[in-house]
Image: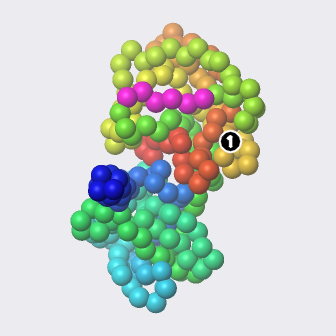
Amino acid sequence: MKKIFLLLFILLFYLSSIAVEPWSGIGVVYFRCHYPEMTEKSINIDIFDSTLTKIILSINSKNYYRSKEIEFIEFADEVKGLCISSIQENAIKVILKNSDNQVQYGWLKRDNKDIGYCLWSSLIPVQKVVFPINNKGGGNQIVFFKTPGGEILNVQIPKMTELWYEYKNEIIKVLDCDLIPTGRVFKNIWMQVDISFPHDEGQDDFECHRIRCWIRYLDDFGRPLVWYHTRD
């Protein structure tokens, strides 16, 4: 019994101290004065407890990056926001981190005109290129389908001659290809992409091959299974 309790404690500690990444939640909430165009406007946003009556934290659009209690995620070119855990009727539940580097939650009022939000289901399919998420080291894997949830497509893609590191050096790219969204989605979890291989490294004699297929880009909870370059 003691061993089981110890294992549960270790597991809970690990889960509560993991980093807040874009794939920790289902979307992002941001300052309207930051996106889609950055302005110099100074805005204060209050983050509440679950009752929406007690303010637990206030952040300012000009010095938000100085906060040690929040880990922001980048979703556009040098534009950051708070990772969304869930969308409720009158509130947006966001993922925070406290001074002990543990995950906690806060709530923002949905009727706050100074904030905006979007889900990954609307943001990822319009990106130029996506790549599989793998922040545990090693090679990343993704399954290609002829149709959403249908027959698996066996594509022989060469491996990279050198490992490429993507988002914050936590994603390791091993397949020599680009995944290019076509903009088509199915049931908000399947996305159509063109597999373009080999990866375009700018050679004059470059010749690529393209195969159109479908991939699962969100899990059952709406969290991303692929990510994109936030900066060109």
Q: Say which of 94 and 6 sits in front.
A: 6
Q: Quadrant of residue 184?
A: top right
Q: Residue at x 53, y 40 (%)?
A: 226
Q: What is the secondary structure assignment of the residue under circle 1?
A: strand
Q: Going by the picture, which residue comes out furthest to the front?
A: 1
Q: Say which of 194 and 232 sits in front.
A: 194
Using the image, determine if residue 100 lies above or below residue 197: below
Q: Going by the picture, which residue comes out furthest to the bottom?
A: 53
Q: Amino acid at mark 1?
A: Trp
Q: Residue at x 61, y 25 (%)?
A: 195
Q: Which quadrant does the N terminus fall into?
A: bottom left
Tell me if residue 139 is in the magenta stretch: yes
Q: Residue at x 47, y 76 (%)?
A: 107
Left or right: 111 in relation to 106: right
Q: Say which of 7 and 85 sits in front.
A: 7
The residue at which mark 1 appears reads as 190
Q: Which quadrant does the C terminus fall into?
A: top left
Q: Kindly tell me whether residue 35 is visible in this rendering.
A: no
Q: Residue at x 52, y 23 (%)?
A: 177
Q: Main secondary structure of the magenta part?
A: loop
Left or right: 114 in relation to 211: left
| Label 1 environment density (alpha carbons within 10 Å; few <14, some 14–19, many ≥20) | many
Bounds of the magenta segment: 138-143
